[in-house]
Image: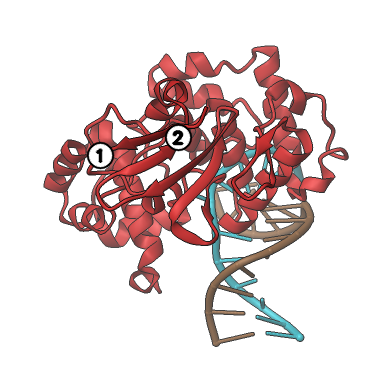
Chain colours: A red, B brown, C cyan
DNA sequence: AACCAGGGTGATG
DNA sequence: CATCACCATGGT
């Protein structure tokens, strides 16, 4: 039962949201940035960018149960953008450059794994490792619009049963042992993502950092993208450089509940203007 | 408290 | 073709 659902949302651009480094399983269809497809919550979705709307190819039920929340469509991004723009000229300009960025509500476990994989790594390779991880240990849930098989993201239980050797096909290098440690601690309950979702953010960070391979940066990414802790402002090498130039003397904490969105605006803007940050 | 390895790939020159 | 860098972290 395929349905077409339109969402008329002024601050929602597919390319800006799906290719800004927060999620790794979305691909342009036929290399054309007007249509995208990917997998989340065990479901395949294809979407198209229209001039004044986004078209989702999914059932009404999936839209209500999954995609509306996944794309954070209850939130008013125009308002968030205005609030952030008022706080910093650089953020105003970065947000104007990509006003259609939204913070996705990804699955906590998937976000945690994705950002463990992301450490000291480049985006094309991160995507490759995650794709191989899903092919190796995920469930086949169907076929995409081109007829290729589609796999869900593997469960913690499935990953828990692996060894560094069995994960060799991922070519994830030293990160394999971190993935296994994460799965073991989630399954044993030693690390509780539900708790991390609700605790004061310093406690949430500490909770996730019990996992080997999870430091402050990876914890912040898992919190922001997986648990929607939007006060988190993941600070990596890129962001440090960008912040020196664009936000000198500013503390990300100033941006409050919208710090994570500010980070995405700045991160995306910096990646698209690398010439500004050459030493 | 500095420093270095880990693995493979993209980017740069 | 060689070298560097990489959405960091753990270990020494």
State which chain disc 1 sits on. Answer: A
Marks 1, 2: nearer the viewer: 1
Q: Position of residue A109 (x, y in %)?
A: 58, 27
Q: In this rendered view, identify the residue nearer to me: A203 or A79.
A: A79
**Are the numbered discs 1 and 2 placed on the same chain, yes or no?**
yes
Q: Could you tell whether A216 is left or right of A149 in the image?
A: left
Q: Name the quadrant containing residue A96.
A: bottom left
- C-beta proximity under 8 Å, tags 1 and 2: no
Mark 1 or 2, nearer chain start: 1
Residue depicted at 55% across the width and 60% down the height = A30
Residue A9 image label: 1
The answer to whether residue A279 is seen in the rendering is no
User: Please, is residue A59 above or below residue A7 in the view?
Assistant: above
Q: Position of residue C1 (x, y in %)?
A: 76, 86
The answer to whether residue A68 is seen in the rendering is yes
**Mark 2 — residue?**
A225
User: Please, is residue A94 above or below residue A256 in the view?
Assistant: below
């Amino acid at each position: 039962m395929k349905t077409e659902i339109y969402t008329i949302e002024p601050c929602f651009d597919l390319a800006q949201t799906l290719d800004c480094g927060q999620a790794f399983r979305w691909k342009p269809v036929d290399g054309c940035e007007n249509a995208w497809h990917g997998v989340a919550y065990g479901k395949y979705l294809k979407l198209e960018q229209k001039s004044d709307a986004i078209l989702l190819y999914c059932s009404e039920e999936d839209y209500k149960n999954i995609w509306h929340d996944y794309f954070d469509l209850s939130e008013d991004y125009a308002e968030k953008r205005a609030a952030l723009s008022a706080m910093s000229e650089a953020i105003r300009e970065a947000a104007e450059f990509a006003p259609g960025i939204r913070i996705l509500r990804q699955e906590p476990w998937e976000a945690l794994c994705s950002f463990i994989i992301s450490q000291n790594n480049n985006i094309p390779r991160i995507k490759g490792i995650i794709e191989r991880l899903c092919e190796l240990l995920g469930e086949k849930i169907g076929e995409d619009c081109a007829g290729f098989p589609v796999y869900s993201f593997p469960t913690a239980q499935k990953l828990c049963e692996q060894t560094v050797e069995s994960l060799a096909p991922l070519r994830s290098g030293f990160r394999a042992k971190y993935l296994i440690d994460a799965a073991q601690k989630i399954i044993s309950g030693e690390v509780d993502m539900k708790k991390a979702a609700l605790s004061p953010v310093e406690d949430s960070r500490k909770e996730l950092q019990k996992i080997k391979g999870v430091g402050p940066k990876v914890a912040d990414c898992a919190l922001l993208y997986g648990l929607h802790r939007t006060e988190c402002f993941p600070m990596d090498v890129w962001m440090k450089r960008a912040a020196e130039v664009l936000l000198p003397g500013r503390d990300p904490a100033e941006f409050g509940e919208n710090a994570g969105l500010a980070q995405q605006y700045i991160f995306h803007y910096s990646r698209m203007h690398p010439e500004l940050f050459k030493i």
